[in-house]
Amino acid sequence: MFCAVTSSTSSSPPVLLFVLGMHRSGTSALTRTLNLLGASLPGRLMPADPESNAAGFWESIDIAALNDRLLREFGRTWDDVRETPPLKVGDTALDSYRATALEILERDFGGSEPLAVIKDPRVCRLVPFWRGGAVEAGFEPRFLLVVRHPDEVAASLAKRDGLGEERAHQLWQRYLLDAEFTTRDALRTVVCFETLMSDWVSVARATARELELEWPHPPEQIGEAVTNFLSSRLRNHHHVPVDTPGGGSRGLYEVLRQAEGNVGDLFPRKMDEARQALDGEIAVHRAFLDEYQGSLLRCRSEVARRLDEIEDLRVGASSLEEWAEELAASLERANSDQARALTWVVESLFDGLGQAGPDPEVPLGTQLSLGLEATHRWRAEAKDRIGRAEKQLGRVREDLTQAREELVQAREELATERSNLGRERAEGQARVDALQVDLARVSAQEARSLDELACRDAALGELQSRFEELSDHAERLEAKVELVRRVPLAEWLWQLASRFRSEPSER
């Protein structure tokens, strides 16, 4: 079991800040700003990417990898718009993941960090897991929800990952709605990327107020460092108002933006309505999404497996190369031993010939024969060692050639898998587009049918009124006929004559 992290400067538990926001929303910029204000970063950081994030990601490689594995455990990926399955803190299925998380927290922040920060957009969908892990490790978790206009996020995702606009808007909503729902009972604040870029000092002060913090490095002491970091090059996409899909995300953006600096204005009812609207929108294509995301997850798992195999082959090839170098060194030492042996024999022969007189005990011919025998013996031993070394080197070269061929084949298979994945993604997007067109056509037909039904209802109402009038008239006529039947003919004629006599005066 891992030891709980404790603060050396205060009796209260250390604070762990979680930066929550959609990918490409400015979470990296905010995390680095918090780091300059005094929050400690994890130990193993993801390297900067000159293409997508030259200023750095400022997030842990290990935490990102753990979150990817945890999402796959529940059949999800980072770009899955479906709701995240409930994550229960005490779920035994998460024990191995929880142990890894505690190990990372202890390794990176153990012992003496009163304030630390973790950033990975995937945490938005895994807040219960990381919140429980932070508490178990001895931290007090507090949260920052980072908001950037969804149009800018969609443009950035389209450039980096090729995501369609509607899907990017749905992902933006899913990440923020999950993060907001799972942090309602915690200390939290909302930070707009636009405000961070234009007035980071006000963001720092509002964050300290709402999260009840005191920065180890006050803003006035680090102003130049933060200002130099938050340069315009961190923002490559700017929002331009357009009338395109994504109205739900834009409305949600306005609600979150208005809560910046005063998270109490973030009314749960509005957020729940936005979540229900998103779930209803996704439910229309749920069957297709389940099939598509399942296929995508299997493809990504296969790609990850192939990459692991390639890495194993690379390590094996490196080991074979080292072995080949060792054999080459052994061969060189064997050649050196042979050279020294020959030199010793020649020197011995010359020394023997250069003696003042022959050794009476050993004839000169015997000495020469012994020298030649030693020379032949050393030569035979050297040839045998060289032969064995050459055979070993040949086998190593064959193994190395085979490993290289397997590596080339694995790379070709990986390229094929990537091509198939891209084709499947394009086909899936085309199917989504076709379904959306069909849905629009059905909606239009339904509207026309409703209009026709309303017109028929109105006409039916008029006919019903006319029918009632005719029914009343018929009843009156029947009453008169019945009256005529009951009155004798003479009396009836007398009443009729009286009526005609009275009508002139009435007229």
Image (cartoon, rainbow, N blue to C red):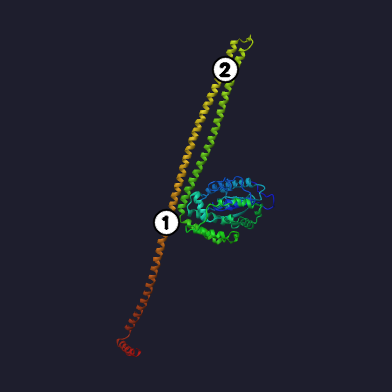
Q: Where's residue 449, x and y in %?
A: 39, 63
Residue 281 vertical position relative to residue 497 in the rendered view, above or below:
above
Residue bearing the label numbered 2: 375
How far across and down, in percent of the image, does residue 75 sit? 51, 49
Crowding at mark 1 (Cα within 10 Å: few <14, some 14-19, many 20+):
few
Residue 498, x across and y down, in percent? 32, 89
The reply to whether residue 108 is in sight is yes
* Residue under the point 44% across and 53% down: 432
Question: How many numbered dots are placed on residues in this image?
Answer: 2
Side (left or right) of 287 relative to 57: left
How far apart marks 2 and 1 lie (CA) works out to 92 Å
> Residue type at mark 1?
Val
In percent of the image, x 51 and y 39: which residue is there? 310
Nearer-the-camera pick, 224 or 367: 224
- In the displayed structure, 110 sits above or below 364; it is below
Task: Identify the image quadrant of residue 443.
Answer: bottom left
Residue 506 is labelled as none
Q: Earlier in the sequence, mark 2 or mark 1?
A: 2
**Can residue 88 be seen at all in this image of the molecule?**
no
| Residue 157: % across, % down | 51, 51
Is residue 350 shown left or right of residue 439? right
Amino acid type, residue under disc 2 in the picture: Thr
Name the residue tied to disc 1: 437
Task: Classify mark 2: residues with Cα within 10 Å, few (<14), some (14-19) or many (20+).
Answer: some
Q: Identify the residue at the far top of this view.
A: 360
Seen from the viewer's position, the closer of residues 182 and 315 is 315
Label pair 2/1, CB-CB below 8 angstroms? no
Residue 311 horizontal side relative to residue 216, left or right: left
At mark 2, the secondary structure is helix
